[in-house]
C-alpha cells in the first residue's frame, strides 16, 4: 500500500466532541429522505385511489378493471426509466441538484392527476410520479451515504426505506378520509417541502472533490460535520466515467455482482406476492374490515424498519441480512403450508384466481388456518423490514467507487424495478403451474439462496469509510 493509499484509508468516525454543527448532517439526511417519503406516498396512492376512481361519477374520470391495473402498474415502468435517468443525472448534475430536479415530476405528476379529466391524464400523472420515484430511489441513498460519517451511515441510510414505508402508510391512512383528488393534492406537499429544505443543504463533499472544487468540499464538510479534521480525500482515480473495460477490475465487477444480486434477491423473496395477498388473508381470518389489512401491514413495516435503522450500525449489515432471510424462509414455508392444507382435491385445476381465496368450500378449520396465514404474513413483513427491505438500498450506496457510482446505482435500480414488474406480472402464472403452495415454497428457496449469498459474498461495511470499502474490493 502506498503512502497516498494509507492516507486515503484513514477512518473518520464522526465529528469530534459531538459538535452541534455535526447535527446538521441529520437535517440534510432528513431533507433528502423526503424524496423516499414522496416515493412511498406515490406507491401507496393507488391502493385507496383505485376504489375511489372506480366509483367516480361523471364528469370525473372512471377506471374500469383494465385501466385500474395499468394505473397501479405503470408506476414501476416510470420508475425503471427514472432509475436510468437518475444514474445519468447523479454524475453530471450532482447529488443535490438531482434531488431538486426529481421534485418537478413529483409535483407535476400529482397536479396532472388532480386536474385529470380522462383516464389518459391519470395514467400520464402516474407515469410522471413513477419517473420521480426512480430518480429519488437512486439519488437519496447516494446523497445520504456520502454526507454521513461511518458511525451513523447505517442508521441514516436505513431511514431511506423507513421514509418509504411511512409514505405508504400515510397514503393508506389519509385514503380513509380523502377522495382521490385531495389525496393527490396532499401528494404535492412532501416534494415541495423537500425542494425548500434541499435549497439550503450543501452538495456532498465527495462529489465536489471529483469536480476538483476543494474549497467548496471543505465548506460543505464544515457545514455538515462541524469539522474538517481527519478528513481524507477520496481516491478519485484516473477514470471520470464508466466503460465496459473497467469490468475486468475486481474493484468494479465485485460490487456490481453484489449490488445487482441483492436487488434481484429482494424481489424474488416474494414480498410483492405477500402484499397482494394481505387483504384476502385478512378476509379469510374473518376480519370485519379487511381494509384494515393494509394499515396493519404498513404499521408493521414502519415499526420494524425503524428497529433496523436503530440497530444497523451495531449489528452490522450482513448479520441483519442473514437474520432477516432466515425469518423469511420460515414464514414463506409456513405460507406455502397454509395453501397446501387449504387446497381442495388433487391438482387438476387449470387456473388459480390470484386474489381470491384458494379454498372455495368452507371447512371447520378454515378460520384457524387463516390465522396461520395472518401470522406468517406478519412475520414475513417484519423479517423483510429488518433486513432485506432497507439493506440492499443501503449497500448499493456504499459499495461502488465514486467514478462509476452513477452508472452502477442506475443498473441496480433498473434491476430492482424490472424484477418487481416481472415478479408482480408473472406470479399468478407461476401459481397456475406450481399451485399456490409450490409458488411460495419457490420463494422460500430464493430466500435460502439470499441467506447463503449474504454469508459468503457480502462484505461487512459497518464502521468503514466509503474509501475503505472501495479499498477492500480492490484488495488494498
Image (cartoon, rainbow, N blue to C red):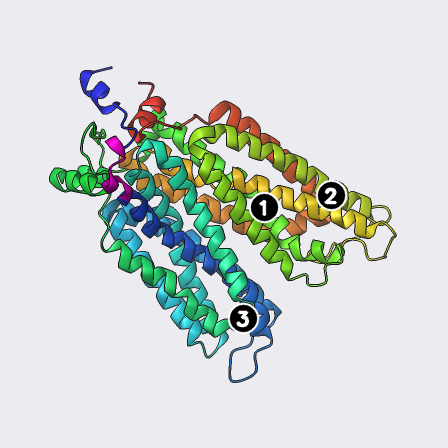
Q: Residue furthest top?
A: 1
Which quarter of the rendered picture does the N terminus lie within? top left
Q: Main secondary structure of the magenta part?
A: helix
Q: Is residue 270 left or right of residue 120?
A: right
**Label 3, label 2: how many angstroms apart (C-alpha)?**
37 Å
**Which element is circle 2 on?**
helix
Counting from the top left corner in percent of width and height, residue 438 is at 72, 41
**CA gap, disc 2 and disc 1:** 15 Å
Q: Which residues are magenta?
A: 16-23
State the residue at coordinates (51%, 28%): 319
Residue 181 to residue 327: above or below = below
Q: Is residue 244 left or right of residue 387?
A: left
Q: Earlier in the sequence, mark 2 or mark 1?
A: 1
Residue 17 shown in magenta: yes
Residue depicted at 48% across the width and 35% down the height: 261
Earlier in the chain: of badge 1 and badge 3, it is 3
Q: Residues within 10 Å of mark 3 (few under 14, many from 20)?
A: few
* Nearer to us: label 1 or label 3: 3
For label 1, the crowd category at 10 Å Cα-Cα, with few meaning under 14, some 14 to 19 and many 20 or more, is many
Q: Is residue 114 visible?
A: yes
Few, some or many residues within 10 Å of mark 2 (<14, 14–19, 20+): many
* Residue carrying label 1: 271
What secondary structure is found at the residue carrying circle 3? loop
Q: Can you identify the residue that label 3 sits on?
A: 177
In the displayed orientation, state which residue is furthest to the bottom. Answer: 59
The label nearer to you, 3 versus 2, is 3
Disc 1 versus disc 3: distance between alpha carbons?
28 Å
SS class of the residue under badge 1? helix
Labels 2 and 1 touching (C-beta < 8 A): no
Q: Which residue in the structure is indicated by mark 2?
A: 437
Amino acid at each position: 500500500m502506498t503512502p497516498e493509499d494509507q492516507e486515503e484509508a484513514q477512518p473518520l468516525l464522526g465529528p469530534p466532541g459531538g459538535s452541534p454543527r455535526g447535527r446538521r448532517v441529520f437535517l440534510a439526511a432528513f431533507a433528502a429522505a423526503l424524496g423516499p417519503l414522496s416515493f412511498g406516498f406515490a406507491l401507496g396512492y393507488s391502493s385507496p385511489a383505485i376504489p375511489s376512481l372506480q366509483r367516480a361519477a361523471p364528469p370525473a374520470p372512471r377506471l374500469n378493471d383494465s385501466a385500474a391495473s395499468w394505473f397501479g402498474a405503470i408506476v414501476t415502468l416510470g420508475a425503471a426509466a427514472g432509475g436510468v435517468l437518475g444514474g445519468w443525472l447523479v454524475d453530471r448534475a450532482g447529488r443535490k441538484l438531482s434531488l431538486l430536479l426529481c421534485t418537478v415530476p413529483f409535483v407535476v405528476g400529482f397536479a396532472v392527476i388532480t386536474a385529470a379529466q380522462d383516464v389518459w391524464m391519470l395514467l400520464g400523472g402516474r407515469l410522471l410520479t413513477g419517473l420521480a420515484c426512480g430518480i429519488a430511489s437512486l439519488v437519496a441513498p447516494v446523497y445520504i451515504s456520502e454526507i454521513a460519517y461511518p458511525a451513523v451511515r447505517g442508521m441514516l441510510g436505513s431511514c431511506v426505506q423507513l421514509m418509504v414505508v411511512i409514505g405508504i402508510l400515510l397514503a393508506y391512512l389519509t385514503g380513509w378520509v380523502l377522495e382521490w383528488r385531495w389525496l393527490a393534492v396532499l401528494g404535492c406537499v412532501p416534494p415541495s417541502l423537500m425542494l425548500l429544505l434541499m435549497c439550503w443543504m450543501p452538495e456532498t463533499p465527495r462529489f465536489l472533490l471529483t469536480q476538483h472544487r476543494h474549497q467548496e468540499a471543505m465548506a460543505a464538510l464544515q457545514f455538515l460535520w462541524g469539522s474538517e479534521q481527519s478528513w481524507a480525500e477520496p481516491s478519485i482515480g484516473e477514470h471520470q466515467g464508466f466503460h465496459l473495460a473497467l469490468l475486468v477490475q475486481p474493484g468494479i465487477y465485485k460490487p456490481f455482482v453484489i449490488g445487482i444480486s441483492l436487488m434481484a434477491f429482494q424481489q424474488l423473496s416474494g414480498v410483492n406476492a405477500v402484499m397482494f395477498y394481505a387483504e384476502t388473508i385478512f378476509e379469510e381470518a374473518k376480519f370485519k374490515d379487511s381494509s384494515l389489512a393494509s394499515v396493519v401491514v404498513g404499521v408493521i413495516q414502519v415499526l420494524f424498519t425503524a428497529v433496523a435503522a436503530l440497530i444497523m450500525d451495531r449489528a452490522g449489515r450482513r448479520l441483519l441480512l442473514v437474520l432477516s432471510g432466515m425469518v423469511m424462509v420460515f414464514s414463506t414455508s409456513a405460507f406455502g403450508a397454509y395453501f397446501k392444507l387449504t387446497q381442495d382435491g388433487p391438482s387438476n385445476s387449470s387456473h388459480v384466481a390470484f386474489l381470491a381465496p384458494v379454498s372455495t368450500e368452507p371447512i371447520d378449520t378454515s378460520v384457524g388456518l387463516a390465522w396461520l396465514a395472518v401470522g406468517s404474513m406478519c412475520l414475513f413483513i417484519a423479517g423483510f423490514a429488518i433486513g432485506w427491505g432497507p439493506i440492499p438500498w443501503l449497500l448499493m450506496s456504499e459499495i461502488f467507487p465514486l467514478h462509476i457510482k452513477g452508472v452502477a446505482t442506475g443498473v441496480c435500480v433498473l434491476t430492482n424495478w424490472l424484477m418487481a414488474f416481472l415478479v408482480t406480472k408473472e406470479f399468478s402464472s407461476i401459481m397456475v403451474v406450481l399451485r399456490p403452495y409450490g409458488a411460495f415454497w419457490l420463494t422460500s428457496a430464493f430466500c435460502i439462496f439470499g441467506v447463503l449469498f449474504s454469508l459468503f459474498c457480502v462484505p461487512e461495511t459497518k464502521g468503514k469509510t466509503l474509501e475503505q470499502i472501495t479499498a477492500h474490493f480492490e484488495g488494498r
